[in-house]
Amino acid sequence: MLLLLRLGRAFYRILVDYCNNASLAGIGYIVNRRYHPTERLFWFVCTSIAWVFAVRLICSYMELFRTDTISIAVENIDTRAEPIVFPAVGVCEMGYVKEVYPGLQSYLGSLQTNDEMEFNYDVEDYMLRIIFHNLYNEGSISSYCAMYEECDDCMRCPKDGYSQTAAMVRANCSTLFRECRWNDKPFDCCRYFQPIETTIGTCYLLNSLQTVEKHGKKWLPLEMETEHPDGDLLLTYNYAVTTHLMNEDDIPHILLRRLQFQQTMQGHEEKIYFTLQNIVNDPLVRSVDIDVRRCLFPDEHALPFGNTSYPKYSYSVCVTECLKSMQLRVCNCFHHNMLLAGKFSCHENGSVCGYAGMQCLDNAGLIAPPTRILQPWYTGGFPCHCYPSCKENEIRIVGRHTYMNDQAERSVKLKLMIHPTQRYRRQIVRENIDVVVSIGGILGLFTGASILSIAEFFYFFTVRFVSYAVRDDGHDTDEGSDDAEESSSDDEHEEQSVYTDIS
């Protein structure tokens, strides 16, 4: 008890001593007994108002720093020094009802257990719809197979093995492509178009960070300079496909169709004209929190629903993983199109949907869900909180022309209409040093505080507090109080004498 009393007296002496000698403006007038209580109350009110305004300004600034640190500006490009790079391209095979698929015919023939069993076209339609995304109709999975479940002499729908069947039915790269040309110069299609699994199925991507190393052996240099301004990419196909214009970290997706172009019928020829506007990032953008800059770099894999299996992050990758997590949560399996090559553990664990799983996905509307699930405010239970990529360029279609000819192949020509003369730059408006300067300025303006005020505070309540607590006793305290009062009286007497002499 005596120890606590001694510590309390020491703390009181330190508090009074600190207020009398601190560099903070105003507080010395509050505790000084030489001034009238009205003056001390006046300074207490002024000091309190100053601290309230300082705290409110600091809180407002910190909220502004948290939510408005990044800005996007437009800057000019020197095309003589910086070449323009053609965007990535994706090619995905489509299902076409007038097409004959030898692999599918062979597989369905193996389902006929005897020569008397008739060929079942409903089973063929069912397989086409689960292999090719564009032929799928919501609610149609059960309608093709349910009537044959109890039939012993009928060809039934297969219950599993859909990923292997899709790989057998779909065309490989050498069969899918007929010719590839860059500025009228042919190049090896299958060397540069590398396969990857997506929600649409197996697609072939050109110059994608998801499949090849940038500027590596399988990266096709598609750069345009002032001396060589042309940027024409001609692709000729043997089968119906969709062609996708993408950023180099994107993948084709069943819900993202803005830059998707279909070449279905034989003799279909299309020319697509587009413009490109790049975006660059200042190095310090990475130091800003993700929720503040509201974008992710390709090497950042942290997603709300787990890390991605793809090598790089992009908005389309995030949406793919989100859809996959929805399917796993609702039906405990996912569509076979999203089984990444080499990820055999998922297949061995039974996570790829069979017939029952496909029925569940179909009934839940999760094979080709509505695009509103991409909106962060969607309240249907499955929102995708996906940020765009920090390196996502802006691609705009400015023209599209379709022709028909008598040839058997399909073709598409992608042309960059004009070289961009401007680009976007994502930069930091307020850095960490700006926070220190701004908060220091606010405290200095309203309270007279500085960095030394912090050292002064810790000095009084550590070193001096320990010193007072060790030396403190009742006699010293009383004597110290009397000395303080006498000193105060002497000061007042001297001040009055000075005033009398002056007058």
Image (spheres, rainbow, N blue to C red):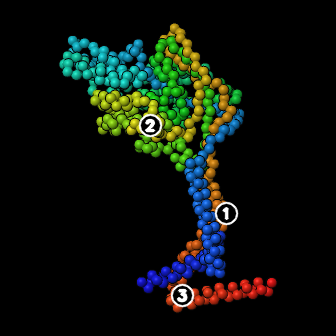
State which tag comes first along the sequence, 3 or 1.
1
Residue in view at x 47 percent, y 14 percent: 265
| Location of residue 445 in the rendering, given as x and y in whole percent from the top left corner | 67, 63
Q: Which residue is mark 2?
A: 378
Crowding at mark 2 (Cα within 10 Å: few <14, some 14-19, many 20+): few
Q: Look at label 2 and name its amino acid.
A: Tyr
* Residue identifier under label 3: 477
Separation (CA) of disc 1 from disc 2: 46 Å
Pick out the residue farthest to the top: 406
User: Can residue 195 be seen by looking at this rendering?
Assistant: no
Q: Residue at x 51, y 25 (%)?
A: 260
**CB atoms at circles 1 and 2 under 8 Å apart?**
no
Q: Is 406 situated left or right of 431 in this image? A: left
Could you tell me which quadrant the N terminus lies in? bottom left
Camera-side residue: 358 or 198?
358
The disc label shown at residue 445, or none: 1
Depth check: give the residue in front, 184 or 378: 378
